[in-house]
């Protein structure tokens, strides 16, 4: 480049570059220096992009003992800043500058890039490598920010950045690698899709107080995202459109505390197959209009939904199917509007609140070790009966097993009895009749001592009947004393002999009564024996 052809502001920049000295073209009036007012700036603030390219590509040698750098404030940069595939060793630091055309840094190797409070009609840095920080704080970028396949060894700072590409990709960062933290906070806003699928972040990912707007699709598409530390989507975080974290991995905790997610009639938060090494917080004012799904997710600590508001009335509002978690705190601020699906989830401790139980649940296959509060069996049965799939045996068996593990055998039997009764409602008429008889007589075997009442009643009945109608003596040579009470007892006892039944034999209808007493005694006696055995074994 011919230095003699440079304009006065370009000469200032050319002269300052070898020592890395800053060049400030601003007027000192904050209102006038706002990049939004760049249309009023004069020629004294115009820098051609080709001048920047020449400096960064080595057209000027650094001065010995100094670090050459482009440090420019308040300039309007015209033309194409194209550093595609370039090897740039000098830092680039632009503050309050305005670009007429989108800079192209694709597959470039940069030292560090700072574009603070700038206005750009796009920025293309696909495949670029930045050995240091990429600092875009406070900038406004329309037309899309492309960082797909890029590698940043330091921090990616997009605090306060506004990205605008409605209907398209506001941020295209597929397979992005950042070795330190990523900041999308302090007023970060995006109109269009923010894409981070397959991205890797070596530190924290911070979306605190961010505003994402893409109501027709994904506001944040981050499937297979890998973050070594924590992810913050809290502090006033709001999204219009789907938050997609399917298959993502978080090495620390994931916070959606107080977040507001809206994607009506569709999925607001898709965290299927998510892996989180500590806790997930969708709590303390978290609100989702649309489905929230953690299907197949693995949370090593707690999934906290305390104080949440979940609304997806015509579908599954909360999908925890196949979730694995140490603890789930399911105590929302109000009753969930929609189905809560816990099918085949594996949870060590499930904490809930009867006051906010959802009207519709799916519980088949749910495994848990403890419930808090434990409640009594009758209250927990109300919880089971909210299952939209109707009667399923497994939830009853699981609840009964939990009570038995806590030493609450009576509650366990109550649950199993309810299981048999609820199953009866699904059966045909013949089986219903048999079930009714089993229930009335022995409570399906879970009320064995009810049989003792029946035995006592049958003993009284037999004593009265046979007192009025003494049976015939089988052997005329014998003249034993007949006792109606002991005769009836002899008929009822399935084992033993009181010497009455083998001597006396009723006739006609009384023989049928005797046979009925024998059969009833056999069945009821075995039931009582089984109940006594279980009681003794528990002792």
Image: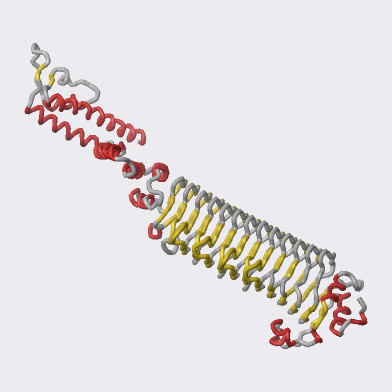
Residue 34 visible within the image: yes
Q: Residue 234: image x %, image y %?
A: 57, 66
Colour scheme used in the picture?
secondary structure
Q: Residue 315: image x %, image y %?
A: 46, 58
Location of residue 230 by image quarter = bottom right
Is the N terminus in the top left, top right, bottom left or bottom right quadrant? bottom right
For image coordinates 41% across by 53% down, the residue present is: 373
Which residue is at the far left? Answer: 468
Is the C terminus in the top left, top right, bottom left or bottom right quadrant? top left
Q: Is residue 395 left or right of residue 230?
A: left
**Nearest to the observer: residue 403 or residue 135:** 135
| Relative to 45, residue 307 above or below | above
**Nearest to the observer: residue 315 or residue 368:** 315
Q: Is residue 417 left or right of residue 262?
A: left
Location of residue 452 by image quarter = top left
Which residue is at the far top? Answer: 477
| Relative to 116, residue 347 above or below | above
| Relative to 199, residue 368 above or below | above
Q: Residue 245: image x %, image y %?
A: 59, 58
Q: Residue 537: image x %, image y %?
A: 36, 33
For image coordinates 42% across by 63% down, the residue present is: 334
In this rendering, the count of numbered labels is: 0
Q: Is residue 384 left or right of residue 166?
A: left
Residue 443 visible within the image: no
């Amino acid at each position: 480049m011919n230095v003699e052809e440079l304009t006065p502001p370009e000469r200032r920049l050319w002269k300052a570059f070898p020592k890395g000295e800053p060049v400030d073209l601003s007027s000192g009036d904050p209102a006038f220096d706002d990049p939004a007012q760049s249309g009023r700036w004069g020629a004294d603030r115009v820098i051609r992009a080709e001048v920047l390219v020449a400096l960064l590509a080595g057209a000027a040698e650094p001065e010995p003992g100094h670090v050459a750098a482009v440090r420019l404030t308040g300039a309007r940069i015209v033309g194409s800043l194209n550093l595609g595939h370039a090897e740039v060793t000098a830092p680039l630091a632009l503050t309050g500058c305005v670009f007429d055309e989108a800079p192209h840094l694709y597959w470039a190797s940069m030292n560090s890039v700072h574009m603070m409070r700038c206005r750009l009609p796009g920025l293309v840095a696909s495949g670029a490598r930045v050995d240091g920080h990429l600092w875009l704080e406070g900038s406004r970028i329309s037309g899309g920010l492309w960082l797909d396949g890029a590698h940043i060894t330091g921090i990616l700072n997009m605090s306060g950045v506004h990205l605008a590409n409605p209907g398209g990709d506001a941020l295209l960062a597929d397979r992005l690698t950042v070795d330190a933290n990523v900041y999308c906070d302090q007023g970060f806003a995006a109109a269009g899709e923010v894409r981070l699928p397959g991205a890797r972040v070596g530190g924290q990912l911070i979306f605190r107080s961010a505003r994402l707007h893409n109501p027709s699709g994904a506001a944040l598409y981050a499937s297979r995202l890998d973050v070594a530390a924590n992810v913050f989507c809290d502090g006033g975080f709001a999204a219009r459109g789907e938050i997609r974290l399917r298959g993502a991995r978080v090495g620390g905790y994931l916070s959606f505390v107080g977040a507001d997610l809206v994607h009506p009639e569709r999925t607001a938060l898709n965290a299927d197959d998510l892996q989180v090494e500590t806790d997930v917080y969708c709590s303390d004012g978290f609100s989702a209009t649309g489905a929230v799904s953690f299907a197949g997710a693995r949370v090593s600590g707690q999934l906290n939904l305390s104080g949440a508001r979940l609304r997806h009335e015509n579908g599954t509002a909360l999908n925890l199917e196949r979730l694995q978690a140490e603890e789930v705190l399911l105590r929302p601020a109000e009753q969930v509007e929609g189905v809560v699906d816990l099918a085949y989830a594996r949870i060590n401790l499930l904490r809930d609140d009867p006051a906010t139980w959802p009207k519709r649940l799916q519980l088949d296959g749910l495994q848990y070790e403890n419930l808090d509060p434990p409640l009594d069996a009758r209250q927990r049965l109300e919880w089971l009966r909210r299952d939209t799939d109707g009667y399923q045996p497994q939830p009853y068996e699981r609840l009964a097993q939990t009570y038995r593990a806590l030493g609450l055998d009576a509650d366990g039997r109550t649950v199993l009895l309810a299981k048999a009764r609820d199953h009866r409602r699904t059966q045909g008429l013949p089986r219903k009749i048999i079930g009714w008889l089993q229930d009335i007589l022995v409570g399906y075997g879970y009320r064995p001592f009810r049989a003792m009442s029946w035995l006592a009643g049958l003993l009284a009945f037999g004593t009265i009947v046979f007192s009025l109608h003494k049976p015939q003596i089988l052997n005329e040579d014998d003249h034993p004393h007949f006792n109606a009470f002991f005769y009836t007892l002899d008929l009822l006892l399935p084992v033993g002999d009181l010497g009455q039944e083998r001597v006396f034999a009723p006739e006609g209808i009384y023989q049928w009564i005797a046979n009925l007493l024998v059969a009833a005694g056999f069945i009821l006696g075995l039931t009582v024996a089984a109940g006594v055995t279980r009681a003794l074994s528990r002792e």
